[in-house]
Image (cartoon, rainbow, N blue to C red):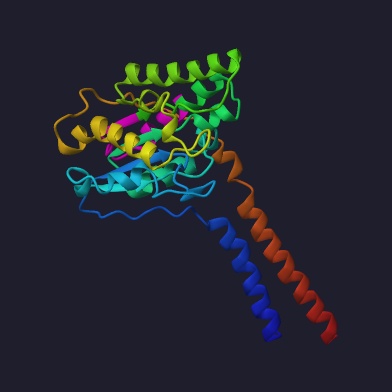
Amino acid sequence: MNKHLFWHLMLLSAIIFGSITTVRAVPQPDQDLESILFLGASNSVEEIDSVPRNGSYVSFLRHYGSPWDTINILDGSVSGYGVADYFGNIELVNDTVFESNVEYVVIVLGGNDFLGMFAPTVFEERFTWLIQAILFLDTTNSLKQIFVANIYWALVTLNEERTRSFEQYLEIIDQTSKDNNYPLLDFFNVTENQEDYYVDNIHLNDLGHQAIAQEVDLVVGPYLSGDKARVSAFDIPPTIFSYDFENDETPFPFAIFLVVFIVLKTFKKISRRRT
C-alpha cells in the first residue's frame, strides 16, 4: 500500500475515534486533602463593561486561611450553565463531580434557568434530579454534605408574573434545603438591594463576590473544620433517569463502519489499478 495513503487512513481513524473518546477535563486535586466542589454557572469573568475584577468568591475563599487552606477548592463552574445543562446527562454529572473524589458539593445553579424562562415546575424536576444523580453516583459513600445556594438578587426589572416565578425558584431551593438537610447559602439575602455589588444587571463585582465568600465561609466553614457534620444518612435513589445510554449506543459502531468502508474502498481502487 502507498505509504502516504496508509498514514492518511491512520490519521482519519485517529480523528474519528479520538472524537468519541474525548472527555471533559477535570481538576486533579491533592489526594491527601479533602475536596469541595462548587458546581454552578461561572460568575468570574475578569472584566465586564471595562470594570476589572479579581475572579469570583471561589478565588477569595482560597485566601481565607483555616479551614480553606487545608482543603482542595475545586471550581466546577461553566459560563452560562444551568440545571438544564445537567438534566438527564448522568455522564456529565459523573465526570464533573466524581472524577475529583469530592467530599463536599455546593450547588450554585438556578439563575440561568430562570433567565431561560423555564417554568418553576420544570426547574424543580431538574434540580431534584441533579441532586439525586449526585447521590446515586456516590458509590464509595465519600460525600459528607451537599450545600445548596439560592439565586443572587439582581437589577433586572421583572413584571408581576416573572417576580412570582423568581419567588417560586427561591421557595423550591429553600424547601429542598429544609426537606433534605442540605445547608442553604442565602445568596439572595446577602445581595438584596445591594446595587453597589454589581457590575451590570446580573454580574457581581469584587465587593459582591467578597460578600458571597463570607456567606460561604459562614455556612460551609464549620463543616470543613469538623465543628459540624451531617446528622442523617443521605436518601439515595435506587435508580436514576438518564439520556446517556440512548445517546451512547450509535456513534461507536458507526465510526467502525465508516473506517472499514473507507479501507475497503481504498483496497478496491488499488486492486483495480494493479489489474
Q: Position of residue 143 (x, y in %)?
A: 28, 36
Q: Position of residue 94 (x, y in %)?
A: 42, 43
Q: Who is closer to the viewer here, 154 or 171? A: 154
> Which residue does the image show at 22% across and 27% down from the upper left?
230
Q: Position of residue 36 (x, y in %)?
A: 30, 42
Q: Who is closer to the viewer here, 155 or 142? A: 155
Q: Who is closer to the viewer here, 30 or 257? A: 30
Q: State whether residue 241 appears in this view.
A: no
Q: Classify residue 37 by image quadrant.
A: top left
Q: Who is closer to the viewer here, 266 or 16? A: 16
Total marks in image: 0
Residue extending farthest left: 227
> In the visual, does 214 lie left or right of 42?
left
Whether residue 136 appears in magenta in the rendering, the answer is yes
Q: Position of residue 237 (x, y in %)?
A: 39, 26
> In the visual, does 60 lie left or right of 193?
left
> In the visual, does 189 lie left or right of 117?
left
Q: State whether residue 240 appears in this view.
A: yes
Whether residue 198 appears in magenta in the rendering, the answer is no
> Which residue does the image show at 46% across and 43% down from the upper left?
42
Find the magenta span and give its range: 128-147
Q: The N terminus lies in which quarter of the figure? A: bottom right
> Which residue does the image show at 19% across and 48% down from the upper left?
70
Q: The C terminus lies in which quarter of the figure? A: bottom right
